[in-house]
Image (tube, grey):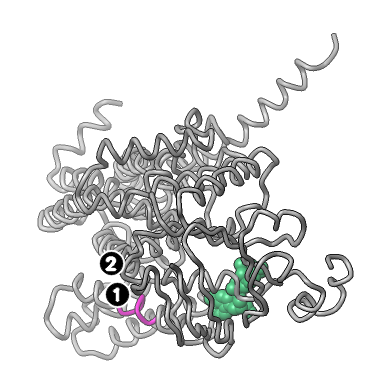
Amino acid sequence: MLDWIIQPLSLTFMQRALMLGILLGILCAVVGSYMIVQQMGMLAHAISHSVMAGLPIAYVVGIALSFGALIAGVISALMLYLIESRSRVKTDAAMALILTSFVAIGVTLVSIIPGANRIDLLHVLFGNILGVTMKEVWWTLAVTVVAITLMRLFFKELLFYTFDPKGAQASGMPVHFYNASLIIAMTVTIVVCLPTVGALLVVALLVAPAVTAYLLVKELHQMMWVGSIIGSLSSVIGMYLSYYLDAPSGATIVLVAFCFFCLAFLFSPSEGLLVSFWRKHMRSRLSMPS
Amino acid sequence: MLEIQNLSIDYRGTLALHNVSFFVPAGQLVGIIGPNGAGKSTLVEAILNLVPVTQGVIRFKGISLKRQLLKTAYVPQRSYIDWDYPVTVWNVVMMAQTVQTGLFNKFSRQAKHLARTALERVGMYELRHRPIGELSGGQQQRVFLARALAKEAELLIFDEPFTAVDRKTEDIIFDVFQELRAAGKTLLVINHDLGDSLAIYDQLLLLNKRLIAQGTRHEVVTSDNLERAYGRGLTRVFA
Ligand SMILES: Nc1ncnc2c1ncn2[C@@H]1O[C@H](COP(=O)(O)OP(=O)(O)OP(=O)(O)O)[C@@H](O)[C@H]1O
Ligand SMILES: [Mg+2]
C-alpha cells in the first residue's frame, strides 16, 4: 500500500503534479467560496468555455495561449454584462448564447487558421495533470499567493459586499470594482486550471470543494480553509487514480471531489440528509410510550 | 435637514417616481406609505444613491447627500438578503464599521465597542456567534437594526422593518426609533400597514408614483387621499 503511494513519487512528473494539485486545491477553494456566495457558478461555466475562443487567436498573434484564454474569458463576461444591462434578455439565455458562440469561434478558428490546428482540442477540453511543466507550477504558485494576499487584505470589504451588495453600495463602497475584481479572479483561476482539468470540467474544481465545505461550516473563511483541504485531497487522490487507471486526470479529480460532496451531503453534522433522518428516527423512538 | 426637490426616477422607460418634493426636519420619524409598486423602495434607494436619478436634487443639511453617505444607515427589504450566507451575527454588525475603518485596517476597539452596545440594545449580544441563517425573522431584523445603530448615522432608512417580526421585536424597534428621534436623528421608514401602527410617525408621506399627500396621520389618511393612491375599495375600511 505504502509502496503504491511512494513509488510514483520518484518520477519527476508526478512530483510536479503533486505540487500543482495542492496549489490548485487551495486557489480554487478561496476563489470558489466567493463564487458560491455570489452565486456566480453559471457565469464561471460560461467563462470557462468561452476561453477557448482565445487560444487560436493567441497562437496567431504569438502570445502565450493562457493569456489569449484570459482575454477571451474577460471579453465574454463583459459581453454578458452588456447584454444583461442593455436589453430585456435574461442572464440564463445570454449565458447559453455567449458560451456556445465563443466555443464555435474557437473551433472554427482552430481549423481555418494555418498552423492553429496544432492546438490539441482534446487536451484543451480535458487537460492532463501528469503533463504539466515546472513553469506552470511556478505560475500557479504565483497566482495562488497573489489571490490569498488580496483576499486577506480585502476580506472585510468583500464579506460586506458579497453579503449585502445594496448595503455596501449605500455605504459608498465601490461595488462595481469589487464585482469586476471577483470576476477577473475567477477567470484567472479558470485559466490556471485549464491545463490540468480542461475547459469542460474546470468549474467542478471551483465549485465542488467550496460547496462541500459550505455544508460543513458556518463562516466564509472556514469555507476557504476546509475547501482548500478537500480540494487538495481531491487533486492528489485523483492524480493517483489517473496514473494507475490511465484515465484523464481532470475526470478522476472531479469524481473524487464529487465523492467528498456526497459524503458531506449525507453525513454533515448540521444538515446531512442521513444525520437528520437518524435524529428524527431516534426522537420518535424516544418519545414512544414503552 | 433632508430636502428632496423635483425627484424623478425612470427605469428604462418605466416611470417609477414623478416630480417628488418634500422636506424633513431633524429629529423626525417619517413614515412612507403607498400601494405595491408605488415607488417607496425606489425613493429610498435614490436617496441612498442606489439607483440613478433621472432628475432632481437630494440634499442633507444643505449638501448633496451623495457626498456624505457615511452619515446614512440603511436596512434593506428582507428579500434582498441571502439568509443562507455563511456569516455570524457579530460579523454582520461589524459591517457597519467597514468603510470607516478603511482598507487594510483592523477594526478598532472603539468600533467593536459600538457593535457590542448595539447588539446589547436589541437583545442579541448573547447570540453573536450564531450564523445569521439560524435566527428567527424577528431576530434577523434586530441584527440589522443593531448594524444600523452601530454606524452612528444621522439619517436612518428602513425598508419595511416590520415584515415577518414578532411582537417582542416590534416593541424593540419602536423603542429604538423613539430613542433615535430623541437624539435628534432623522428616520425614514417604509410601512406597509395602514392601521394603528401609523400612530408612531411625526409625519407621513403617501406615495403613488407622485407624492399624493404629506403631513400628520389625520391630514394624510383621509378617504380622499387613499382613493387617489389605492383606488376605490380600501377607503371604506380606513377612513
Ligand atoms: N430594477 C428595476 N428595474 C425596472 N423597474 C423597476 C426596478 N425596480 C423597481 N421597478 C419598478 O418601479 C416601480 C416601483 O417599484 P418599488 O420597488 O419602488 O415599489 P414599492 O413601493 O417599494 O413596492 P413594494 O410595496 O412592493 O415593495 C414598480 O413599477 C417596479 O416595477
Ligand atoms: Mg419595496
Task: Give residue A216's position: percent from left, percent from top.
Answer: 47, 36
In the displayed structure, A114 sits above or below B236; it is: below
Residue shown at 78% from the left, 72% from the top: B222
| Residue B238 part of the magenta segment | no
Closest to the observer, A256 or B221 = B221
Amino acid type, mark 2 = Ile
Q: Secondary structure at mark 1?
A: helix
Mark 2 packing: few (<14 Cα in 10 Å), some, or many (20+)?
some
Magenta region, residue range: A75-79
Q: Which mark is residue A184?
A: 2
Mark 1 lies on residue? A74
**What is the chain identity of the residue bearing mark 1?**
A
In the displayed structure, A278 sits above or below B111; it is: above
Q: Is residue B121 left or right of residue A148?
A: right
Task: Give residue B183's position: percent from left, percent from top.
Answer: 45, 48
View quadrant of ligand 1: bottom right
Residue shown at 43% from the left, 80% from the top: B52
Q: Is residue A46 left or right of residue A61?
A: right
**What is the chain identity of the residue bearing mark 2?**
A
In the displayed structure, B135 sits above or below A95; it is: above
Q: Is residue B192 left or right of residue A158?
A: right
Mark 1 packing: few (<14 Cα in 10 Å), some, or many (20+)?
many
Closest to the observer, B201 or A93 = B201
Dominant SS in magenta: helix
